[in-house]
Image (cartoon, rainbow, N blue to C red):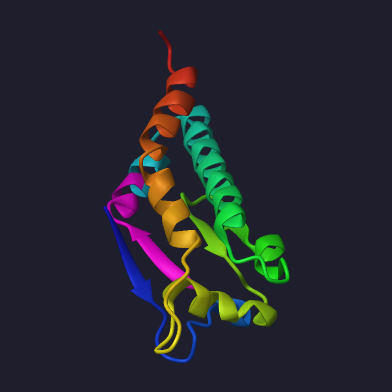
Amino acid sequence: MAARRRGRGGGGRGRGGGTTITVEVIGTDRLRSQLNDLRTDIRLAAFEALREAARAIVEDTKGKVAKDTGNLQESVNARFHNNQLLAEIGWWDLDDLYAYWQELGTRRRPPNPALVPALEAERAKIGDRINSKVGAVLPR
């Protein structure tokens, strides 16, 4: 289950002054703590599944984002946090602030989302990605 939250006021600026839309996957805290108890190869397989999912979301977003100048398409990216099952996907440059309004709309402009539909598409696939990667390192 995922919950979407808009940034607080003023365009959703996150660390580094970029644009953030936060999607929280419920249950990952428990999964992270359980991963710490697993063998290293199983943890690495789970992290690889996360990297694949994040890359798929980035590529899907690039295909859906408004392409006036191509800036948003070129600058969407994924960041990963070491030793955590955590990826951030979005835009972090101040020049990309308008991604927030593209994604969520304004009073005068309807939303033209690209990131959220990419997240929703990947949500249906992430379980299979994890099963495939972790299953490959488990003994048969």
Apparent side of residue 128 relative to residue 67 in the rendered image (left or right): left
Is 101 colored magenta in this rendering? no
Tell me which residue sits at (71%, 61%) in the image. Answer: 74
Q: Nearer the viewer, residue 113 or 96?
A: 113
Q: Is residue 92 visible?
A: yes
Q: Vertically, is 107 above or below 31?
A: below
Q: Decide which of 82, 20 is in the foreground and name it.
A: 20
Residue nearest the viewer, comparing 61 with 84: 61
Above or below for 53 versus 109 = above
Rendered image quadrant of residue 9: bottom left
Q: Is residue 80 visible?
A: no
**Place of residue 137 in the rendered image (x, y in percent of width and height, measured from the top left):** 49, 20
Residue at the (33%, 54%) spot, across then down: 29
x%, y% of residue 3? 29, 63
125 relative to 70, above or below: above
Whole-percent x and y of residue 129?
Answer: 45, 32
Give the vertical position of 80 relative to 14 (above or below). Answer: above
Q: Is residue 33 left or right of residue 41?
A: left
Decide if residue 69 is on the left or right side of residue 1. Answer: right
Left/right of residue 37 with respect to residue 10 in the rendered view: left
| Image quadrant in which you'd find residue 5 | bottom left
Residue under the image location 42 percent in, 80 percent down: 7
Residue lying farthest to the top in this orientation: 140
Quadrant including the C terminus: top left
Q: Residue 26: say if magenta.
A: yes
Q: Which residues are magenta?
A: 20-31
Residue 49 in picture, x, y percent from top left:
50, 37
**Count of all numbered marks drawn on residues in the image:** 0
User: Residue at image x 68%, y 71%?
Assistant: 68
